[in-house]
Amino acid sequence: MRLLKLVPDDTNIDFLKWRKVASFMSFFLVVISIALVAVRGLNLGVDFVGGQSVHVEFTGEMPEIGDIREEVGKIGLGEATIQQFGSDKAVSIRTALPEGDQAAAERAGQQLVAGIQKAFPTAHTGQVETVSGKVSEELLRTGAISLALAMLGISIYIWVRFEWQFGVGALGRLFHEVALTFGFFAVTQIQFDLNSVAALLTIVGYSLNDTIVVYDRIRENLKKYRKMEIVPLLNLSINETLSRTVMTSVAVLMALTVLLIFGPDVIFGFTAAMLLGVFVGTYSSILMSTPVLVWLKVGPHSFVPRTSAGADGAERVASRNDDGAVV
């Protein structure tokens, strides 16, 4: 039985030929994404704008999530976020924080509880919890700091693990993917909440894995083919890892597509962001992270060869023959 191969072993595509066009397109899309966020803004969820949350448990048969959302919408407190919580007969319902003082928030909480109990007699509600604007601002600030530190930490790791040129390339790639994801949320107005921050952090982690694979092959080839020009060497490295990149991305995209179509509404934003992030990440690993190495003039001189002591005690520089063996 022959194994399925999406990419033939003898693939030899000149990806770097399109590096200027790809870089221009990526720069253009990043600028458009930033402009969309600035003009349209993000549809921030209750986590970031404040709101009220109540835990509801049903003693009988649990209604459909869509029916619960419809009944809560009739209460008049705005769009609600409903998530299954704890058991298969319990949900968490979150609504936006009403305008006014603490008394207005308490009245809205009582109205929410009364409306739920009237619509669903078998429902038992817990205490209404209020997320103030101050707490939501802190969550937003913490989420932004976490995302920035994750990107910076990954770039520093790649810098130390490889060379500074690779760190710059990784940071540019991560910024590209995160910016396009923010642009996606701005243009679609899908609710941006803590799940969306989790999606962004997951995209950053996925990109790290893919970046390390490609960069590690580039480093090996830089040591193995010391006289090869940098553009052919980068093309060779991309083609050698292309099968792994495509197979991994296709498998993840298939799973995310099924989850996007059949998954619950509460993770729709997370899944959509992940779907876009994996697609953009695959494109970035091929056409975004490598051109930077050309412009920053990375080459065999970027890596200090290891030395070993010979039989006469003198240190000798390790090198490789045409087959890649250390001599």
Image (spheres, helix red, strand yellow):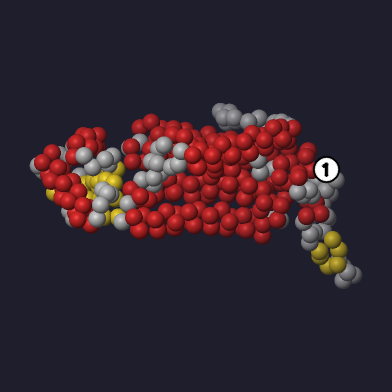
Q: Position of residue 314 (x, y in %)?
A: 88, 69
Instruction: Please name the residue shown 24% across and 34% down the image.
Output: 66
Q: Residue at x 81, y 65 (%)?
A: 308
Check the image and name the residue furthest to the top. Answer: 1
Q: Is residue 65 left or right of residue 293?
A: left
183 relative to 153, above or below: above
Residue 227, percent across and down?
A: 85, 45
Q: In the picture shown, does residue 245 fall above or below 302? A: above
Q: Which residue is mark 1?
A: 228
Residue 230: x and y in percent read 79, 43
Q: Is residue 19 left or right of residue 174?
A: right
Identify which residue, 233 or 127, lies in the foreground.
Answer: 127
Residue sticking out furthest to the front = 100
- Could you say which is closer to the camera, residue 215 or residue 75? 75
Mark 1 secondary-structure assignment: loop
Residue 85 appears in view: no
Q: Which residue is nearer to you in this view: 102 or 309? A: 102
In percent of the image, x 35 and y 32: which residue is there? Answer: 262
